[in-house]
Amino acid sequence: AEMGYNVIAADIYGKGIRPQPPEAGKTAGKYKGDRVLYRERLTAALELLKADERTDQSKVAAIGYCFGGTGVLELARAGAEIDGVVSFHGGLDTQKGMEAGKGKVSSKILVLHGAVDPYVPAEQVAAFEKEMNEAGADYQFVSYSGAVHSFTHKEAGDDPAKGAAYNEAADRRSWAAMKAFFAEIFK
């Protein structure tokens, strides 16, 4: 919103459901295990945003962090008609049979990834890139050295050995990358 865009925060879980660790992982797992349901919830939020008269229909994108980063990639895989998606330290995998089909991905994709994120191993990165290449997707993949999961969240602490930690350089650079991506796709 600070950048002048109309925004919406998708409520995937439902009214009053705000899981905290360790329940948060289980609750998110419901949607990670049922990508059809996850996509339905994401699409409903996107349609609500697009229906808002304040939304510039020529400039629609989705961004997400962690679970939300996984979600915006699901929107892209599903062929959502938006200009672009930006995933900050999101999971890159999808369910079998839910992969992006050839020519189905219409939005541009920017993935901002912690190079040593233990939750998104090299095999997942390789599988994602293979999937996007086979789909003919227009994507960029930026990997930040030394960054683990949750690199944009100060609340994650500063111990990368825990698998999730704030990384000031990756946070700053990823935000700049998103702004540059928007400048490109919203010409």
Image: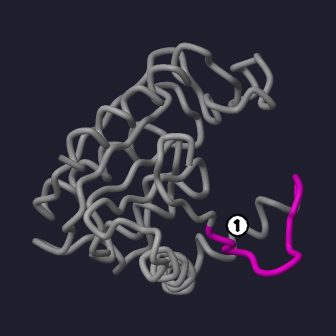
Number of marks in picture = 1
Label 1 SS:
helix
- Residue underneath mark 1: 28
Q: Main secondary structure of the magenta part?
A: loop
The region drawn magenta spans 10-22
Q: Position of residue 163 (x, y in %)?
A: 69, 30
Could you tell whether 151 is left or right of 84 in the image? right
Compared with residue 161, is residue 21 higher up or lower down, i.e. above or below?
A: below
Could you tell whether 4 is left or right of 182 in the image? right
Is residue 117 rendered magenta in the image? Answer: no
- Residue at x 27%, y 74% (from the top left corner): 81
Q: Position of residue 59 (x, y in %)?
A: 31, 59
The residue lying toward the viewer, choosing from 8 and 87, is 8
Q: Position of residue 157 (x, y in %)?
A: 80, 23
Q: Give the image quarter of residue 149.
A: top right
Is residue 13 rendered magenta in the image? Answer: yes
Q: Name the kind of residue labelled 1 in the image.
A: Ala
Q: Position of residue 39 (x, y in %)?
A: 48, 79
Compared with residue 41, is residue 165 higher up or lower down, i.e. above or below?
A: above
